[in-house]
Amino acid sequence: MHVIVAIPARLKSTRLPNKVLADIGGKPMIKWVLDQCFKSKLIDQLFLCTDDNYLNQKAIEWGYKSLLTNQNCNSGSSRIASVIDKLVDGKNLEDTLVINVQGDQPFIKPEVIDEIVLFAKKEKKIPDVITPIYKIKNKDVHDPNLVKTLITNKKEILYFSRSALPYVRDKDKEEWSSSYQYWGHVGIYGYRGDILKNWDSFPASNLEKLEKLEQLRLIDSGIKFNAFEVEGDFLSVDTKNQLDFARKICIDY
């Protein structure tokens, strides 16, 4: 099995423009992500995938591989899919694991990336998609910036949402977490290569558009997501408050 980590990045984010270049403790956010991924012990290759010439050049200056992508990609996964042939470079798609790490996760744990690889290796065939989940604290259950997952007893994902799922009837919202363990999505996907190769063949989903969550396109198309639990909290920087928090805690990394 060949393992690739691909980090999609752009500068035209709507909620926090140019966020991947935001300074965190004297280092741009995107370099934090690259450096954290580089610490993973079980990956074979690491790439930045970007439509921006400046980001492309900076990654190369920092010693990382980078691929320029189509500017019309509407999601991180779409961006990686647009250069899948260059990433895989002739290798067997069904024996290639492509791990999509978001460019706004400056403190992504390399151990979590390695756990995705270990999950894939224990299966006879690389699953369609592998993604880590974690237990949400009570105060975060109703935060729309934190993506929740609804899972089966076998830890297969039924749905992703910015809303708290399931709805707990006959209880105040503040009490929902006493009845159900809510799960957060770390925001990393381990794709089998052929799933990414076929990304454009999956029709755009209305749910994807409503929630602004790219993974719902695959859920709507019947693609199976396997989940596994990881410990801790996981920060994605989408707002100024989250950026301020990242700057406050970066000393711990």
Image (spheres, rainbow, N blue to C red):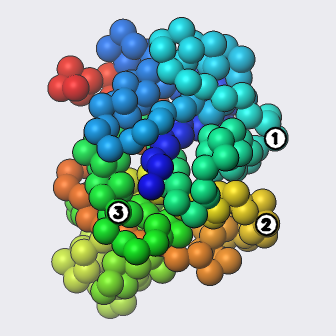
How dense is the environment of label 3, judged by Cα within 10 Å: few (below 14), some, or many (20 and up)? some
Q: What's under tag 3, amino acid-wise?
A: Lys
Question: Is 124 situated above or below 50?
Answer: below
Residue identifier under label 3: 121
Residue at disc 2, secondary structure: helix
Q: Position of residue 31 (x, y in %)?
A: 44, 21
Q: Position of residue 225 (x, y in %)?
A: 48, 72
Residue at disc 3, secondary structure: helix
Residue identifier under label 2: 201
* Residue 198 or residue 24, whichever sits in front: 198
Question: Is 97 situated above or below 125?
Answer: above
* Residue 143 or residue 250, whichever sits in front: 250
Name which of mark 1 and mark 2 comes first in the sequence: 1
Q: Position of residue 249 (x, y in %)?
A: 24, 27
Question: Is 108 situated above or below 48?
Answer: below
Name which of mark 3 and mark 2 comes first in the sequence: 3
Residue at disc 1, secondary structure: loop
Name which of mark 3 and mark 1 comes first in the sequence: 1
Q: What's under tag 2, amino acid-wise?
A: Ser
Q: Quadrant of the N terminus?
A: bottom left
Q: Is residue 191 visible?
A: no
Residue identifier under label 1: 72
Q: Residue at x 39, y 42 (%)?
A: 43
- State the CA–CA distance, disc 3 to disc 2: 27 Å
Q: Residue at x 30, y 31 (%)?
A: 39
Q: Position of residue 34 (x, y in %)?
A: 43, 27
Question: Is 51 situated above or below 139?
Answer: above
